[in-house]
Image: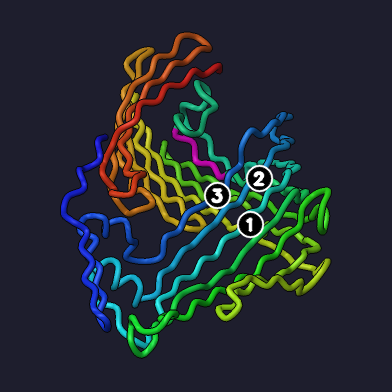
């Protein structure tokens, strides 16, 4: 995608007791609400299955940042509302990051099974019309590697007259940080969590529910510091509030609800994924022609915008090759672009 050309002149209107800033098209980068980023990521896990049981080891990373502008500052920058005297223009930023190694073991159990007439031809309950219910749980031990958070507020307060004297505004900034790290302050953390789920099959219809990081939390011994800006001396002061203070962090739960229906060579599916910062929805269909597959879908992204996908695949024996194209709006202007992906699978 090609970004739109930024048009319009940035205008600044100044008088002794008047200030108005018109950012033209640049104002579109100022968020209407708070700006949130982050998520929970499980990457590069290594595991081994033993029938219905499995064991897995892998890193877990949780990131979150939320930046919020005060109404006065947002209105002045986004809507060109004039700055006024005796008014505070501020912002708040809250950030958190933590990483751990998850040691996980799980087991799945079939609680209900009613055979269908065609089950002798296929033991797959997704395709043979069987009525079945499966449940599974995977508790995990969490070895915390590092944790850090920061809660910061800052801003400027105007005087009686906007431009009078050598110091027309008063600046304030106050940040509280908390951290622990392997090999440093506080050392490692320890905790427990789990993944749980269930899936129900009925006449080639599938309904699933999964909870990732259910009850997951890590206990740390943290160092707490406060950083304050002094407008009079124009200096930052750092105060250590606590050392080895016990603190429990939590990993947000990710909930997934999915439905699927298989009709001959066609599969229709949809899901809703509710995480820490966003709720996304996906829907799509897949149709097989021998060794070839055609796929299409839509989804709602984290900005509540609808996106579109399409692609195909080829499977030869135990080798599969897939190509897909998907739109996204992961840019400041929220313009729709497209990306092409490819995957090679070994079955």
Look at the picture and state if 194 lies above or below 250.
above
CB-based contact (under 8 Å), mark 1 and mark 2 = yes
Tell me how far mark 2 sits from mark 3, CA to CA: 18 Å
Tell me how far mark 1 sits from mark 3, CA to CA: 15 Å
Q: Please report whichever mark, 2 or 3, sits nearer to the chain's N-terminal start.
A: 2
Relative depth, front residue between 27 and 340: 27
Crowd band around label 2 with a 10 angstrom C-alpha radius: few (<14), some (14–19), many (20+):
many
Relative depth, front residue between 123 and 210: 210
Specify start and end residues of the magenta stretch as a single range: 129-133
Crowd band around label 1 with a 10 angstrom C-alpha radius: few (<14), some (14–19), many (20+):
many
Residue occupying the point 64% across, 33% down: 44
Residue occupying the point 36% across, 48% down: 301
Residue 182 locus on image (x, y percent) = 80, 49
Residue 294 locus on image (x, y percent) = 31, 23
Picture quadrant of residue 329: top left
- Quadrant in the picture for the N terminus: top left
Relative depth, front residue between 175 and 148: 175
Magenta: main secondary structure equals strand
Give residue 239's mark: none
Q: Say left or right for 285 vs 106.
A: left
Query: Residue tagged by mark 3?
Result: 210
Q: Tell me the SS state at disc 1.
A: loop
Residue 310 locus on image (x, y percent) = 30, 29
Tell me how far mark 1 sits from mark 2, CA to CA: 9 Å
Query: Residue tagged by mark 2?
Result: 60
Give residue 251's mark: 1
Q: Tell me the SS state at disc 3.
A: strand
Q: Is residue 271 magenta?
A: no
Is residue 90 among the parts visible in the rendering?
A: yes
Q: Please report whichever mark, 1 or 2, sits nearer to the chain's N-terminal start.
A: 2
* Residue furthest out toward the front: 166
Look at the picture and state if 233 lies above or below 23.
below
């Amino acid at each position: 995608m090609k970004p739109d050309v930024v048009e319009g002149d940035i205008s600044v209107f100044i008088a002794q007791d008047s200030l108005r800033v018109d950012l033209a098209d640049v104002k579109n980068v100022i968020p209407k609400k708070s700006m949130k980023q982050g998520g929970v990521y499980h990457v590069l896990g290594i595991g081994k299955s033993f029938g219905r049981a499995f064991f897995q080891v892998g890193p877990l990373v949780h990131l979150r940042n939320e930046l919020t502008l005060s109404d006065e500052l947002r209105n002045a920058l986004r809507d060109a509302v004039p700055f006024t005297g005796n008014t505070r223009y501020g912002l708040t930023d809250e950030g958190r990051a933590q990483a751990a190694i998850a040691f996980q073991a799980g087991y799945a159990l079939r609680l209900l099974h009613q055979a269908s007439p065609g089950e002798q031809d296929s033991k797959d309950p997704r395709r043979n019309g069987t009525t079945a219910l499966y449940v599974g749980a995977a508790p995990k031990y969490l070895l915390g590697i590092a944790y850090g958070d920061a809660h910061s507020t800052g801003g400027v307060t105007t005087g009686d007259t906007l431009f009078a004297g050598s110091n027309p505004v008063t600046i304030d900034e106050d940040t509280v940080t908390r951290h622990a790290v392997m090999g440093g302050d506080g050392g490692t953390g320890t905790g427990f969590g789990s993944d749980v789920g269930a899936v129900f099959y009925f006449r080639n219809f599938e309904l699933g529910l999964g909870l990732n990081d259910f009850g997951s939390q890590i206990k740390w011994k943290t160092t707490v510091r406060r950083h304050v800006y002094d407008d009079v001396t124009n200096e930052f002061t750092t105060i250590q509030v606590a050392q080895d203070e016990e603190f429990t962090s939590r990993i947000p739960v990710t909930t997934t609800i999915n439905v699927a229906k298989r009709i001959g060579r066609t599969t229709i599916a949809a899901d809703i994924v509710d995480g820490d910062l966003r709720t996304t929805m996906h829907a799509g269909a897949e149709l097989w022609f021998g060794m070839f597959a055609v796929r299409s879908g839509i989804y709602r992204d984290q900005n509540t915008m609808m996106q579109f996908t399409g692609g195909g695949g080829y499977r030869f024996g135990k080798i599969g090759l897939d190509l897909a194209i998907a739109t996204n709006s992961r840019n400041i202007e929220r313009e729709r672009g497209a990306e092409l992906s490819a995957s090679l699978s070994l079955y």
